[in-house]
Amino acid sequence: MAYILSLETTTTNCSVTLSNKEEILAVKELNNANYSHAESLHVFISEVLKEANIEISKLDAIAVSKGPGSYTGLRIGVSAAKGLCFALDIPLISVSTLESLASQLEIDEGYIVPMLDARRMEVYSAIYDSKNNLVRDIKAQIIDESSFYEQLQKGPVYFIGNGVEKTQKIINHENVNFIMGKFPSSLQMVTLAYAKYTKSDTEDVAYFEPFYLKDFLVSK
């Protein structure tokens, strides 16, 4: 047995999945533009444990989506994950938000560009090949007409995530494919988290911090 609870709170989608190895036992998620994560997350945790009839003491690890993404969402998810790990004395596993987002797609050729909305015309993005290998690291970038030109010249490029809406207004190319309405979900964390669990690729619970990518700015 390897009971892992996966938490995804980096966007408006608050998502919790309970799995045993790579088998999904229960999932609860709600995409709410009002960011109700603080109210919903612990309720969802209780509900998936109850649905799967698993005591919280039986959990073997907690996985959390580490970012980038919403500052507040990241803080809520990571705080909950660390609290559970401390209380239960179990490992903490971090999963790249953009990697799990990219894994929602299966393609035969070309590239996958997971992207999350940042400020103005900026997105957090990375580039993966058709085998889900990272070919360009995560960065914050301002989208313009020349963005991803090199990849688009080589073949199909699939853009996915809540940064797609602003991107489709700017990038126009015969090889572009916009996948609309997709958000990071704890469902795609399951396989990635279990792979890390089997290798004991875990975090130091005391010192782990979310991957914000950019400093948090307070509006005045």
Image (cartoon, rainbow, N blue to C red):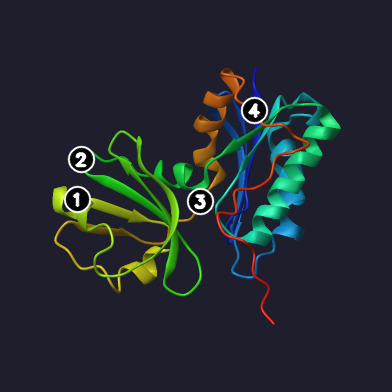
Whichever of labels 1 and 4 marks the residue nearer the N terminus, that label is 1
| Rendering coords of residue 153 (x, y %) | 14, 53
Q: Label 3's element?
A: loop
Residue bearing the label numbered 2: 109
Nearest the camera: 103 or 167?
Answer: 167
Q: Are marks 4 and 2 in contact (CB under 8 Å)?
A: no
Amino acid of disc 1: Pro
Amino acid of disc 2: Glu
Residue bearing the label numbered 3: 184
Q: Dot 2, crowdedness within 10 Å: few (<14), some or many (≥20)?
A: few
Q: Dot 1, crowdedness within 10 Å: few (<14), some or many (≥20)?
A: some
Residue bearing the label numbered 4: 202
Q: Are marks 1 and 3 in contact (CB under 8 Å)?
A: no
Amino acid of disc 3: Pro
| Rendering coords of residue 207 (x, y %) | 74, 38
On screen, residue 22 versus residue 61, left or right, reads left
Q: Disc 2 versus disc 3: distance between alpha carbons?
A: 22 Å
User: Is residue 115 placed above or below 209 in the rendered structure?
Assistant: below
Residue bearing the label numbered 1: 156
Mark 1 or 3: the one toward you: 1
Q: Dot 3, crowdedness within 10 Å: few (<14), some or many (≥20)?
A: many
User: Is residue 162 visible to us here?
Assistant: no
